[in-house]
Image: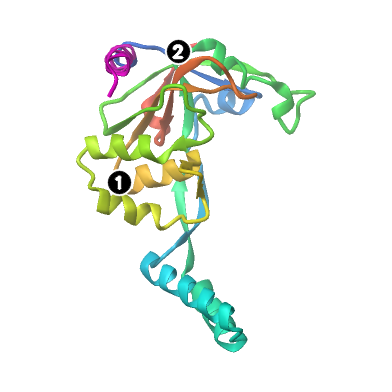
Amino acid sequence: MKIVNIINEVVNNFLIENSIWYHGTPDVRDINNKGSFTPKTDTIDYISDPKKWQETQNAMQQARNVGNEDKYFKLLDVAGSLRDKMTFKKPIFFTDKHNVANTYADPHRSFDYQESEPKTIKVNINDNGKTLKIPAYGERFRGISVDSIRKALNGEGVSNEEIDKYLAMFPNDISDGKMRTDILAVIAQLLGFDIVDVLGVLDSYHGGTTKSTVRMVFDPQRIQIIN
């Protein structure tokens, strides 16, 4: 690791432990009505048996190459049976930069933008759980490199074999060596992490050029609104 990245990581870790976090919302009414963030879940497709899936994909390719349509369509059914769904906790996103969070307080993101109440909320976060810190300096938040994620997981004692197992569950959601943030959230939860910090990432609603730390929190009870 370059010395400048080591310094950046040390400084970021210090700031994270002593920082206020910001969340930009296009409509704060739902949060105000409940007095807090509420837990939300979502579902995602995954491959239940990655090894069998890959073997089936290889066999399908061979059947296609020799023109064996009957075998191909039978294998297609097998591949379909290996697809499943899982429910996961949707992360709540924060940043340590007010101006970054403020880009998400865009009323046009709300389904009721004419009546919406955009706001950037300031919070404290209880981070005494298990936190995964991913050095992603200069990367785009909407596509974090698998190498950066792997390095962070290795640092937490997760083996490459286990990482590969989880990556293989989402073959269609990782491309060009980059992972979507919802997949990152799922894998982090499967590995027992409570919080994910993506360090030095470029993020805003429209893309962004400001480096900040983006924090993903899975349990709303960790969040205390302070304004």
Q: Residue at x 29, y 43 (%)?
A: 192
Give how far across and how far down residue 16 sits, in percent: 33, 16
Q: Measured from the top left, where is residue 30 in percent x and y?
A: 61, 29
The x and y percentages for residue 61 are 53, 74
Q: Nearer the viewer, residue 110 or 15?
A: 15
Quarter of the N terminus within the rendering: top left
Q: Secondary structure at mark 2?
A: loop
Label 2, on which residue? 226
Q: Which residues are magenta?
A: 1-15
**Nearer the N terminus, badge 1 or badge 2?**
1
How would you rate the neighbour count of disc 2 (Cα within 10 Å): few for under 14, some for 14-19, many for 20 or more?
few
Residue under the point 41% across and 65% down = 48
Looking at this view, name the residue that lies furthest to the front.
66
Which numbered marker is on residue 148? none
Find disc 1 in the rendering and name its residue.
191
Residue 159, placed above or below residue 28:
below
Task: Identify which residue is drawn at 58% across, 22% down.
Answer: 204
As shown in the figure, which amino acid type bears the numbered disc 1? Leu
Q: Residues within 10 Å of mark 1 (few under 14, many from 20)?
A: some
Q: Is residue 70 above or below residue 18?
A: below
Residue 19 is situated, as x and y percent measured from the top left of the image, at 36, 12
Q: State the count of labels.
A: 2
